[in-house]
Amino acid sequence: MTNERRLHLKTIEQRLLWLSHWIIHNANHIRSKVDGIKVGGHQASSASMVSIITALYFSALRPEDRVAIKPHASPVFHAMHYLMGSQTREKIEKFRGFGGAQSYPSRTKDIDDVDFSTGSVGLGVGITALASIVQDFIKAKQWGGNLPLGRMIALMGDAELDEGNIYETLQEGWKNGLRNCWWIIDYNRQSLDGIVREGLFERVEKIFDTFGWEVVRVKYGALQRAAFNEGGGTHLRDWIDRCPNQEYAALTFMGGAVWRKRLLEDLGEHEETRSLINARTDTELATLMENLGGNCVETMAEAFDAIGHDRPTCFLAYTIKGWATPIAGHKDNHGGLMTSKQFSEWQKALNIPAGQEWDPFAGIKDVAGLTSFLAGAAFFSNGTRRLGDRRLDVPSIVLEPAREISTQAAFGKIMDDLAKGASDLASRILTTSQDVTGTTSLGPWVNRRKLFARTAMSDAFIEHRIPSTAKWEFTPTGQHVELGIAEMNLFLLLGAAGLSHSLFGKRLIPIGTVYDPFVCRGLDALNYACYQDARFIIVGTPSGVTLAPEGGAHQSIGTPLIGMSQDGLAAFEPGFADELAVIMEWSFDYLQRDGEGKSDERTWLRDETGGSVYLRLTTKPLEQPLKRVDHDYRQGVIDGAYWWRKPGPNCSVVIAYQGAVADEAIAAAGMIAEARRDIGVLAVTSADRLNAGWTAAQRERARGNSLARSHAERLLDPLPRDCVIVTVIDGHPATLSWLGGVAGHRTISHGVEHFGQTGTIGDLYRHFRIDRQSLARSVDALTIGKRLSESLMLVFL
């Protein structure tokens, strides 16, 4: 490394150290406070990463590389982009404030060039490995073009190694031949509540080595390595290696004089080592002992430069938490902040003039030289690296189902029909499932479109002519990525594939399948994928107690509420195959939208912004309706509901259902109609969209637009005031119970609130009162109650 490069990197490191800490200090001690509470930020966690980030971004990275930033190092990330002119002072002055730079890097809320949002620890790490697999998937396709292979890089804290999803990702990477992936561990050995256990690094190295990673231990900085070459230096190195984590942290906090006392006590018997120690002032000795590899920008740059292969690589970078600050090494420094007095003294020590705190180049003598060096940084040479791709034409989804079919089987048939075709959209579909491909009806698609692997692998069952419904042939042209049984990996892969147009300039249509109850097992990663605005379809199937013989462990209850509450995810639960066909055709377009977010005044939904889609399907075959082609029906399916049986002017009861209980609701209406002629049946296909439109219209009216009406209001407003709504769903009853609030109708809600059990569908429907007889009895009970009330009123009068 040239001396000029070394000096420039050191200057950038110091600028990022100052600016990141000033951003946090300003937010907590200078900016006016309204709430009277600590704003927060992580000065110590930023300090331990500053040398690593400097070496990575200004020496090692290329424009095609993608990075997930350690969440607590976000101030360094914002400071770096501020130095490069891609972040504004206005935003960082409002760090952690409304409209300001985010607490943790966010693709959707920050103006910096964020590759992967981070925040929930471990997820930003794991997605880089899955993104690398997605990159290989695209590269192997004819339409992939000349995609430059970038490195998918995660900057992580050592405490993140406690997250189980990291190890699930390691195993998945090994199975899929992971390459072009770097994980850089800020090994500062301090977490929020304490010090990391001794010997962790030995276990870490063994785990990564087991899964085929190269492990690069970056323990000593340039100053330390030079000292080790002096007389007595080997004794100093051995002492550093033996020193417990807690002791090293405590000595660092206490400073040079205490370092000297302790080192002389332990090593003073060695004359050369004693001379090595005494040749340095207290300040120089403290600097030497804090000069671990991860806190030496020169050492980190050299470590990155030394990698000349595409094997996955783990850098174990030893650092000091709070490096080069007054709170370095202190046990409580994770969420701790420098006091105003400490910060003032530290500012003077760094030679930052008062009034120039926000100046990107404050205190720098060779501004022109540094500016030239920054301009030559390869990573920033192409500007903002948000890519894009054209929208794919969506083929018409025409389904000719059997007279009886389940929505899950209909999904499989739709996918098989797409596989038979030659549309551009079909060629961009990436399907994935965590070892439930066959049981979620993706088998026919996979048989035609094959499984993805960079190296072709034949199916021994085919070679030996053993009959099997599954033709498991792996090939680079394959379009299905088979995962192990880890739902977190499923959603991380969908998140990475759902960002492919932005990350790699090639649009994918990712579709994943999962047993519906196990959506909950990957919920953190699902939320993370939606937070990044990744675009994908997740098919939860089979669902509900309708999966009767499987018992309560496999029967979902609360997933409809997850679909309603999850931002960025449009949830549907169609009852019939033709509804599913309409929804999937709409979904393929919805995934690709990127509009301005203006609400559609017909539904008050922001459909032009697009998003992901969740389909809740079942294995229960239903008798299908005759072919329906009218526009109102199709539009109602997408908007969330339509009248299966339209109510008349004197309607006294409406049965509103969602999903597989369609036959029970329709049959109950027929039973009730024997005594009540005017009964409506509302087919709800998306309680999520129906509810979202209703609440959005209410907000619009609160803003002064009295004419705003949602789809739910247009459906229910004409009903007589004394009409009763009976809702039913194979899921939590709260999914539909809110319908009574739309126009003030009394509502009786049927659903599943408790864990299921084994039995037939009939057994369980009766047990949970979602069968036709229970629905009819609810209406009868209401009638009896009404008559009793009227009789009592007459007696009273």
Image (cartoon, helix red, strand yellow):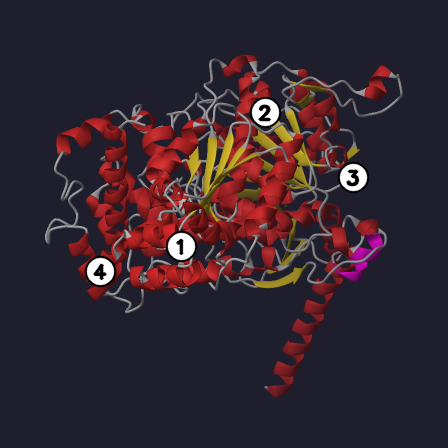
Residue tagged by mark 3?
A: 621
SS class, disc 1: helix
Q: Is residue 767 placed above or below 729 in the rendered structure?
A: below
Image disc number at residue 717? none
Q: Earlier in the sequence, mark 4 or mark 1?
A: 4
Q: Earlier in the sequence, mark 4 or mark 3?
A: 4
Please name the residue shown 76% across and 54% down the image. Answer: 553
SS class, disc 4: helix
Mark 2 or mark 3, which is nearer to you? Answer: 2
Residue 413 sits in which quadrant? top right
Residue tagged by mark 1?
A: 698
Q: CA distance from mark 1 to mark 3?
A: 38 Å
- Residue 494 coordinates in the image, percent (x, y): 56, 35
Q: Earlier in the sequence, mark 2 or mark 1?
A: 2
Tell whether label 3 touches label 1 (CB within 8 Å). no
- Residue 34 coordinates in the image, percent (x, y): 25, 66
Binning the other alpha carbons within 10 Å of mark 2 as few (below 14), some (14 to 19) or many (20 upward) gives many
Binning the other alpha carbons within 10 Å of mark 1 as few (below 14), some (14 to 19) or many (20 upward) gives some
Which secondary structure class fits the magenta region best? helix
Name the amino acid type tagged 2: Ile
Mark 2 or mark 1, which is nearer to you? Answer: 2
Q: Is residue 768 shown in magenta?
A: yes
Residue tagged by mark 4?
A: 343
- Residue 434 coordinates in the image, percent (x, y): 68, 38
Residue tagged by mark 2?
A: 429
SS class, disc 2: strand
